[in-house]
């Protein structure tokens, strides 16, 4: 007999209600539930640069591509919002190139008092040999940084990318212009 684990039940539960009450305007990602393990770590890759600028938009003159708004929360494993957590984002441009001389498509933000964040960027292109992804370092104040990646649903390359993890897929809405993901960090 197949039975769901607690973790699987918590991941599926938000979507069970959708069949009964209809789809809401915005669906949250099926990210790790509080009380479970923290968000999974994923490869940093070769292009991380420390000391990125603090800014809520990675779009600057010369950056082109479909606009993408990333939102979510940073929570502890006990479901407490983490205010002042730092999220450092970096990704390639629409042609699959990373800026290694400056800070184009790189920056960090801090969560608000409710642990919420909002980052404006563009949808990255295909980096050679990889599926579409966005790198993130997330850290609670005074805590160790979690390095991970966010992925897009229904990408043909997901199945062929050895680093891809389905538990790191963002929930997309607004025709792909909005992505949501909640990070769960171990704070102890």
Image (spheres, grey):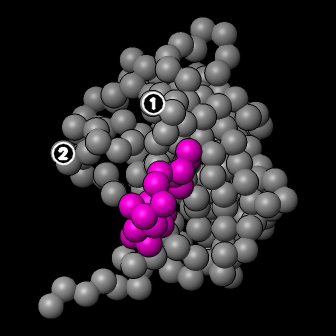
Q: Is residue 126 above or below residue 39?
A: above
Which quadrant of the structure image shows residue 10? bottom left
Residue corresponding to mark 1: 175
Which sits in the foreground, 45 or 15? 15
Q: Are marks 1 and 2 in contact (CB under 8 Å)?
A: no
Residue 159 falls left or right of residue 166 = left
> What stretch of residues is rendered in magenta?
12-31
Write the residue at 56% across / 82% down. Answer: 35
First along the sequence among labels 1 and 2: 2
Which sits in the foreground, 73 or 150? 73
Which sits in the foreground, 49 or 154? 154
Q: Is residue 47 visible?
A: yes
Percent across and percent down for residue 4 are 30, 83
- Residue 18 inside the magenta-drawn segment: yes
Identify the mark at residue 160; answer none if there is no mark.
2
Quarter of the picture containing the C terminus is bottom right
Write the residue at 19% across / 86% down. Answer: 2
Q: CA distance from mark 1 to mark 2?
A: 24 Å
Quarter of the picture containing the N terminus is bottom left
SS for dot 1: helix
Write the residue at 39% across / 78% down. Answer: 9
Which quadrant of the structure image shows residue 183? bottom right
Percent across and percent down for residue 7 are 41, 79
Which quadrant of the structure image shows residue 165? bottom left
SS for dot 2: helix
């Amino acid at each position: 007999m197949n039975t769901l684990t607690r973790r699987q039940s918590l991941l599926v539960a938000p979507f069970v209600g959708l069949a009964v009450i209809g789809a809401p305007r915005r669906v949250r990602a099926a990210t790790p539930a509080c009380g479970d393990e923290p968000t999974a770590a994923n490869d940093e890759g070769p292009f991380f640069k420390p000391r990125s600028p603090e800014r809520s938009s990675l779009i600057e003159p010369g950056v082109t591509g479909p606009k993408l708004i990333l939102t979510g929360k940073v929570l502890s494993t006990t479901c407490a919002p983490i205010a002042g957590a730092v999220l450092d984002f970096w990704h390639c441009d629409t042609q699959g190139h990373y800026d290694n001389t400056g800070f184009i498509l790189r920056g960090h933000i801090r969560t608000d008092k409710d642990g919420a964040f909002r980052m404006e960027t563009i949808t990255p292109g295909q980096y050679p040999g990889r599926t579409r992804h966005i790198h993130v370092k997330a850290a609670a104040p005074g805590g160790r940084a979690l390095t991970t990646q966010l992925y897009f649903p229904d990408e043909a390359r997901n199945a062929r990318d050895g680093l891809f993890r389905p538990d790191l897929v963002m929930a997309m809405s607004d025709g792909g212009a909005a992505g949501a993901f909640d990070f769960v960090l171990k704070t102890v």
